[in-house]
Amino acid sequence: MTDRDQIIAWLREAGIAVYHHIDQDGKYTQEAWGGPGTTAQLERFASLVAAHEREQCAQIADDMDYSPDGAIASAIRGRAEM
């Protein structure tokens, strides 16, 4: 999944409408989201983005030799509880 596709998936998961604009030849031209959304929808979107970024950082920490017991990655993942 591309970054763009992932962002669209998060918008939809947060309940924010995403519209596809197709030109007269049936070709995709652009994508638009359906407005700012509610505060709850925006918070959900931000939460999804933050969770993804945390997991990406934790995976990098898992791959490093600095913390063989996984303490750094666990601390990063634990930030979701804060």
Image (cartoon, helix red, strand yellow):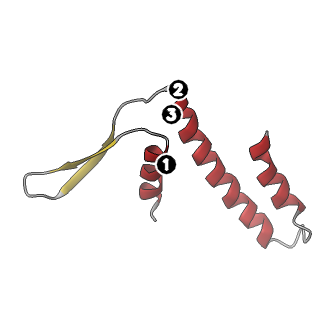
Q: How many marks?
A: 3
Residue at mark 1 to residue at mark 3: CA–CA distance:
10 Å
Q: What residue would you read off at disc 3?
A: 41
Q: Which residue is mark 2?
A: 39
Amino acid carrying label 2: it is: Thr
Q: Taking 34 as reference, is 64 left or right?
A: right
Find numbered disc 3 in the image and state the secondary structure of the residue it sits on. helix
Badge 1 or badge 2: first in the primary sequence:
1
Looking at the image, residue 33 lies above or below residue 7: above
Q: Position of residue 78 (x, y in %)?
A: 81, 50
Percent position of residue 50, x then y = 64, 46
Residue type at mark 3 is Gln
Mark 3 touches mark 2? (CB < 8 Å): yes
- Counting from the top left corner in percent of width and height, residue 26 is at 12, 58
The amino acid type found where label 1 is placed reads: Trp
Horizontal relation, residue 81 to residue 48: left or right: right
Q: Is residue 38 above or below residue 26?
A: above
Q: Residue at x 90, y 72 (%)?
A: 68
Q: Is residue 56 left or right of residue 22?
A: right
In this rendering, the answer to whether 62 lies above or below 46 is below
